[in-house]
Amino acid sequence: MRARLGAALAALALGFAAQSQAQSQAPSNQYPNAPVKVVVPFAAGSSTDMVGREVARILGDALHQSFIVENRPGAQATIGSALVARAAPDGYTLLLGSNTSIAAAPFLIKDVPYKPLKDFVPVARVGSVPFVLVVRPDVPAKTAAELIDYTRQHPGKLTWGYANSANQAAAAAMTKAAGLETTAVPYTSVPQLVVDMLGGRLDFAIIDVTNAAPQIKSGKLRALAVTPAHEISALPGVPPLGSTLSGFELVGWYGLYAPAGTPQAVVDRLSAALLQGLQDGAVRQHFAQAGLETYPAGAAELAGFGQAETAKWQRLAHDAGIVPQ
């Protein structure tokens, strides 16, 4: 199966390369002179997809060219990320990367088909997203402590879901720290995970506020705790999970990346345009309404940040007892 996946990725990457061959001959100062793909390695409707579409809009408006989002979900974001890693390094295929695809993947997936810190060049950091511990309304827990107690009273009975590194690491760390016996269920997208929670097939999850907030506000899910070290404006009154599990803190992030070897002039042009757009008040408000925050940083800072995050996620995966699969 792994061989078939590798062959499929290679074929798709060759397609990207062939499409970009003519474009790569153009001087960098004429970039972009054709549509640009922004690969989002998660499904449509996810918070990563929302960020990717806003990034594409910002760049399209600034550089007067079409930036087209292409969703390539699966395998903890490694399928779409591998396609970009193998694409022509000409700036016409970009990756909306995240803590999952850049920092955490090597500690969650066996034989990741790319090297995050070598196969991509950072362009700019974009934003961050908090996560929230949610349960179905029929689960008799109003706080994280009550959920832990209830789970202890029903060992092996409760299920939780995950679709990315933060979902997995946060819930695994919580259940391990509290000594809980539960069953983890993998998903390819958070929206599908939410559908199964609403349908009664999952008991709890730690998911991004973007997908959770509408369901919380409608009463279809109950919020017990958030993962930053402080309360967040999108969910006032919901306490930090760290108040129950001492020292717990986790926030996801997004950044734009290009294949390694992309001309520096192209990277600089993309970075300047994106960072300028992220300063716009309407953009910040758009992010805030979705429970996100702009978190801009240039290419050099993102490079150092990515290295630090890789070390952090290695510790998180180890502490949570996650074995790459």
Image: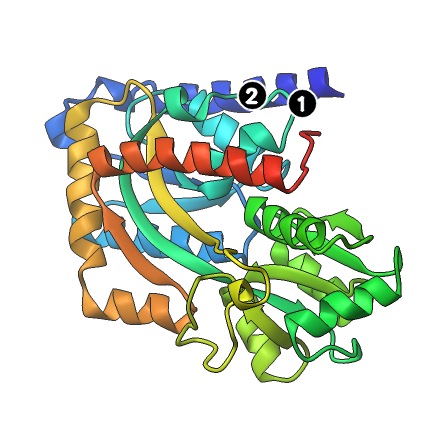
Residue at image location 61% in from the left, 75% down from the top: 223
Measured as percent of width and height from the top left, residue 10 is found at: 56, 17
Q: Nearer the viewer, residue 171 or 26?
A: 171
Q: How crowded is mark 2: few (under 14 residues within 10 Å), some or many (20 or more)?
A: some
Pointer 1 residue: 5
Q: Is residue 104 above or below residue 149?
A: above
Comes first in the chain, label 1 or label 2:
1
Pointer 2 residue: 113
Q: In this view, does 31 lie above or below 288?
A: above
Give residue 8's quadrant in the image: top right
Give residue 68's quadrant in the image: top left
Measured as percent of width and height from the top left, residue 315 is found at: 53, 36
Q: Is residue 306 left or right of residue 204?
A: left
Extreme residue in the front direction: 246
Label ID, residue 207: none
Residue at image location 45% in from the left, 20% down from the top: 86
Q: How crowded is mark 1: few (under 14 residues within 10 Å), some or many (20 or more)?
A: few
Q: In which quarter of the image is the N terminus?
A: top right
**Camera sees residue 137:** yes
**Camera sees residue 135:** no
Q: In this view, does 70 lie above or below 127?
A: above
Residue at image location 49% in from the left, 58% down from the top: 47
Q: Disc 1 versus disc 2: distance between alpha carbons?
A: 10 Å
Give residue 195's quadrant in the image: bottom right
Tag 2: amino acid: Pro
Query: Helix, strand, or loop for circle 1?
Result: helix
Measured as percent of width and height from the top left, residue 172 is found at: 67, 48
Kindly indicate whether the residue at mark 2 contacts the one at mark 1 (C-beta within 8 angstroms): yes
Q: Nearer the viewer, residue 283 or 117?
A: 117
Query: Helix, strand, or loop for circle 2?
Result: loop
Tag 1: amino acid: Leu
